Image (cartoon, helix red, strand yellow):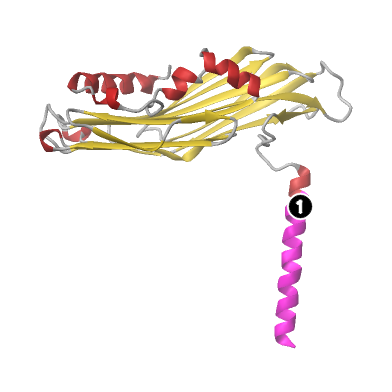
Amino acid sequence: MARNRLLALGLRAAGALAGLAAASLPAGADANYCGLNHGPGTIGFNAAWASGTWLCADAGTSGATGWEPVVTIPDGAGAVPFSAAQSGSSGGVFAASASADATAAPGLLRARAEASSMGDPGAAYSFGGSNATFLERGTLAPLGGASPGAPVDLRLTIEVSGAFLGNGAGGDVDVFVYRAGSIVHQRALVTNILLPSVLEEIDLTGFAVGDDLAIWMGLYAFAGASSDQPQLESGLADLGNSARLHLDVESGNAAFESTSGYDYTSVPEPSAALLLAAGAAALATCAGARRAARTE
C-alpha cells in the first residue's frame, strides 16, 4: 500500500466516526469497489485474468450527519473502458461537499477527487475518492525470426501528471508485472502537492520470447476536508490529466501482443509512422494545389 493511502484511510476513519452516510450508498458506488472486487488477490481478479483485458472504475464520497450522495455514473468493471462518478453534500453546521470521478482504458487511467468543508469546526467534514485500474495480458511474440525462449529485455515507463490543492489531497499509483502468472515486479508511486508529476523508466529482464506477460495498474485519487483547520478546509487531487503506462522491447526480438489490441509502445510503430507521414504529405500536396488554384 502506498503511503498516501494511509492518509486517506485516516480521513475516512474520521468520517466514519462523524456519521454513517456511507451505509446508504447503493451497491457499486464507493471508492473501494475496484480494490475489493477486481484487484490482485480478489476472486474477481481470476475472472479478469481469464478475460485477458479488464478495466475498472469507481468513485465514492462521504461526509458528516445528513450527507446526501448522488451517483452520476455507477462503478463498473469489464473488458471495455469504464467510468464512474459521484458527488455529495450536507448542510447546516455540517455543511460540506465532495465529488469524485474516474475513467479506465487500456494503458490510460484518470482519477479526480475534490472536497470542501464550510460548516462548524469539529462538525463538518467531507471526503472524495476514486480508483481506475486495468489488467492487460499478452504474449511476447517473436520478431525477425527470433526463437522461442530467446532472452527479451523490456522497458516499463510510468507517467503520472496531476494537480493538487490542500494538505488533505493525494494520489497513488501501483503497478504489478506478471510472467506466466507470477508477480516478477511491483512498483508503488506517490503523488501530492509537493510531487504532482512522476516519470519512471524501469528496465525488466528475465523474460523470453513466447512468454505470457501481464500488467496491472491502479490509480487512486483522494481529497479530504475538515473545518477544524484552515489548511484542511478544501482539497483537490486532479489526476485527470492521466496516468499512462508504456512497454517497449529493448532487445528488438519480440513484440507485446496485448489481448485488447492496444499498442503499449512509447512511440508509434514504423507502419503507423509511415502512414502519418504519408497523410501529412497528402495534406501538403492538397494545400499546394489549393494555393495554386487561387493564384490562377
- Residue at the image position 18 percent from the left and 31 percent from the top: 66
192 left or right, relative to 132: left
- At 27% from the left edge and 29% from the top edge, which residue is drawn? 62
Residue 276 belongs to the span the image colors magenta? yes
Residue 21, how many percent across, how many down? 24, 26
Residue 132 x, y percent position in the rendering: 48, 30
Give, as a three-letter code, the residue at label 1: Leu
Q: What residue range appears in magenta?
A: 274-296
Q: Quadrant of the N terminus?
A: top left
Mark 1 neighbour density, 10 Å: few (under 14) some (14–19) many (20 or more): few
Residue 28 lies within the magenta run: no
The spot of residue 129 in percent (x, y) is 36, 30
Q: Position of residue 9 (x, y in %)?
A: 32, 19
Quarter of the image with the C terminus in it: bottom right
The quadrant holding residue 50 is top right
Task: Using the image, determine if residue 119 lies above or below residue 273.
Answer: above
**Residue at point 17%, 35% (across, down):** 230
Residue at the spot of label 1? 275
